[in-house]
Image (cartoon, rainbow, N blue to C red):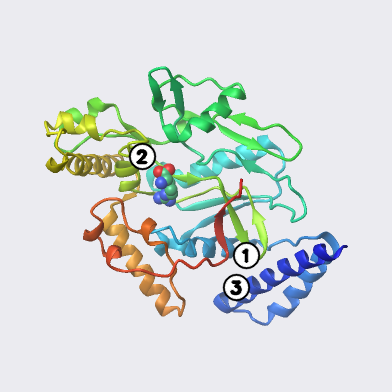
């Protein structure tokens, strides 16, 4: 091996050692550390990588959640359900695993935070298993002469699916197929069965016209474009989910001007003065849209959390971490909810945005 290869290997070993020590410290069994690290050293020398035990993978995925500075929902990091599918190589089998993962996570609406982990990337290879969607479930965004129909954030993925031969129905809420890419193969398309995509129609507890807007959203947010990193090993395909905080849908997905942009229409129906910024028509429409989202998910029996409760849960997480003797890290602009910021507890606090591993990272394009 050349000297850069050895340096590379040393780096993986150092990260492995840090992780193995962390796990031993937190879960007990420090006696195993030396044995485990000598096995890792041998495997690294022989193969250029090493293999996590099932326990290491599960612990690493959970701690990666705990270390996710942008996530307000980290109180529940220990309850992550981890599915280990590192043995799969065929796109068909990967999709089958994704389907059963999604059914487990959805659980008829009582959402379970889960992750589905596929084969890690070999440190010396460029090819890897990847899910090309940013989210496992998302609605298509079609570019038409009359503007974008559907989710503008998904125009690129929609174009990719179309190039691969997919044809959507052209509605504003067409669920995109999943695109799976494995080494030495073209990307392949798979459609999720309608029965596996739980959705909620948006209605309002007091405003009967709200249902006429024809809004809906899916139940389970699954991030599929982040790389799970544990002890120097990268898992490029490791989709994971929690449940929604209402504002993700009510303020951002349906409210943002460059997303579904529903505030003008809602304000019009509320007879608000949309000519004057000072009428606070956007703010008032936002409150009703968010009220509708929380109401609809509750009625449908689908897990959702409002931003006040989520903020309070985050403060409990902070306290829990303090008691465990760990420093909390966070990214303020992501933790503070995109609505009524100063009325939530997290607005008035801040923590350093220091990056720890294990963690979930965006890949460099
Ligand atoms: N905000 C993203 C979306 O609406 C989902 C991010 C993850 N959210 C979560 N509650 N785990 O698609």
In the image, residue 287 above or below residue 39:
above
Cβ atoms at labels 3 and 2 below 8 Å apart: no
Tell me the crowding category of disc 3: few under 14, some 14 to 19, or many 20 or more residues within 10 angstroms, Cα based: some
Q: Look at mark 2 in the image and give the residue it sits on.
A: 253
Name the residue located 17 percent from the left edge and 40 percent from the top edge: 277
Q: Residues under labels 1 and 2: Cα distance? A: 36 Å
Q: Residue 55: which disc?
A: 1
Q: Residue furthest top?
A: 145
Viewer-proximal residue, 235 or 149? 149
Q: Earlier in the sequence, mark 3 or mark 2?
A: 3
Label 2 sits on a secondary structure element that is helix
Please say whether residue 176 is visible from this viewpoint.
no
Q: Residues under labels 3 and 2: Cα distance? A: 37 Å
Name the residue located 42 percent from the left edge and 17 percent from the top edge: 145
In the image, residue 24 above or below residue 264:
below
Cβ atoms at labels 1 and 3 below 8 Å apart: no
Q: Would the CB of label 2 be found within 8 Å of ligand 1? A: yes
Viewer-proximal residue, 290 or 338? 338
């Amino acid at each position: 091996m050349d000297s850069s290869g050895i340096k590379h290997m040393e780096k993986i070993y150092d990260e492995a050692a840090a992780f193995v020590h962390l796990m031993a410290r937190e879960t007990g069994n420090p006696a195993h550390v030396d044995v485990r690290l000598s096995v890792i050293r041998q495997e690294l020398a022989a193969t250029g990588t090493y293999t996590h035990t099932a326990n290491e993978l599960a612990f690493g995925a959970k701690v990666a959640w705990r270390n996710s500075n942008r996530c307000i929902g980290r109180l529940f990091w220990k309850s992550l359900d981890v599915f280990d599918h590192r043995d799969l190589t065929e796109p068909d089998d990967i999709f089958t695993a994704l389907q059963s993962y999604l059914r487990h996570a959805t659980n008829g609406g009582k959402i379970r935070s889960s992750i589905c982990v596929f084969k890690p990337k070999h440190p010396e290879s460029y090819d890897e298993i990847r899910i090309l969607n940013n989210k496992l479930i998302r609605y298509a965004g079609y570019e038409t002469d009359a503007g974008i129909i559907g989710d503008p954030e998904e125009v690129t993925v929609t174009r990719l699916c179309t190039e691969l031969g997919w044809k959507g129905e052209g509605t504003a809420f067409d669920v995109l197929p999943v695109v799976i890419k494995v080494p030495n193969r073209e990307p392949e398309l798979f459609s999720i069965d309608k029965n596996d995509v739980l959705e909620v129609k948006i209605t309002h507890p007091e405003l009967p016209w709200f249902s006429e807007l024809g809004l809906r959203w899916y139940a389970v947010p699954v991030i599929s474009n982040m790389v799970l990193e544990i002890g120097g090993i990268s898992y490029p395909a490791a989709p994971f989910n929690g449940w929604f905080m209402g504002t993700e849908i009510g303020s951002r997905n349906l409210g943002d001007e460059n997303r579904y942009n529903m505030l003008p229409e809602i304000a019009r129906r509320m007879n608000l003065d949309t000519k004057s910024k000072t009428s606070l028509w956007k703010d008032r429409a936002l409150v009703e849209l968010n009220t509708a989202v929380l109401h609809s998910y509750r009625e449908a029996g689908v897990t959702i959390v409002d931003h006040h409760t989520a903020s309070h849960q985050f403060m409990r997480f902070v306290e829990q971490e303090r008691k465990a003797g760990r420093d909390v890290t966070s990214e303020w602009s992501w933790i503070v909810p995109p609505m009524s910021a100063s009325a939530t507890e997290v607005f008035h606090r801040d923590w350093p945005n220091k990056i720890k591993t294990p963690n979930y990272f965006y890949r460099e394009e």
